[in-house]
Image (spheres, rainbow, N blue to C red):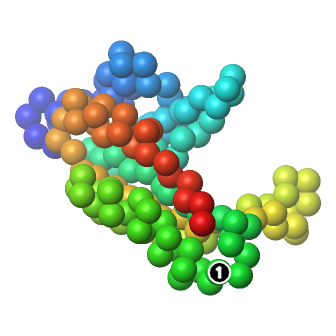
Amino acid sequence: MSGLEETLTIQDIQRALANVGVEIYRSAAEELRIAERVRLHIMDSGVRVVTNHGLAVQFTARTQRSDAPSAHSEELFRRVREAVGERAGSRGYEESSAEIVEVKDPVDDARVLDVWHEVTYRKSLDDVGAVVEEVRWALELDKYVRP
């Protein structure tokens, strides 16, 4: 960040997003988790604005093992990269991580309900206007990849 953007705070970004109707799910010192509404419920959208290592928007896309029980992990990651990664790449996003996440039963931690294959994409930005534009784009993107 340079010039005026050096003084940009997470609260400034939060205000700019609120001004265009974007809701915040959770905020921290260097991260805003963007909300999405599902009927009456506010849920975590998987979209983030982060200020560590510069200003950036990132989002996580996934597929679920339960949708393709016989598929190998490599195949599930490939599906996410083809369905979401190519579109994200054309907007300047880069893959920042890929991980397998076990979704556990909240009552019985030993029981795995599903296994998600998540790929996170990140785009560095220079100003709050670009952040607002990218958050809106990422919210519209279908981040759950079905077979």
Q: Residue at x 21, y 45 (%)?
A: 125
Q: Residue at x 8, y 34 (%)?
A: 3
Where residue 19 sits in the image (x, y, percent)? 36, 15
Viewer-proximal residue among 38 and 95: 38
Q: Quadrant of residue 42?
A: top right
- Element class at badge 1: loop
Left or right of 55, for residue 117: right
For the question of whether residue 15 can be seen, the reply is no
Where residue 143 sits in the image (x, y, percent)? 50, 52
Q: Is residue 73 above or below residue 53?
A: below
Residue lying at the far top of the rendered structure: 19
The three-letter amino acid code for the residue at tag 1 is Ala
Left or right of 4, for residue 30: right
Viewer-proximal residue among 10 and 147: 147
Where residue 40 sits in the image (x, y, percent)? 69, 22
Residue to which mark 1 is pinned: 71
Left or right of 6, for residue 79: right
Q: Is residue 87 above or below residue 135?
A: below
Give the number of callouts: 1
* Structural crowding at the residue carrying mark 1, measured as other residues with C-alpha within 10 Å and reported as few (<14), some (14–19) or many (≥20): few
Viewer-proximal residue among 52 and 93: 93
Q: Residue at x 42, y 68 (%)?
A: 81
Query: Split into 4 quadrants, where in the image is the C terminus?
Result: bottom right
Where residue 88 sits in the image (x, y, percent)? 32, 56
For the question of whether residue 74 can be seen, the reply is yes
Query: Split into 4 quadrants, where in the image is the N terminus?
Result: top left
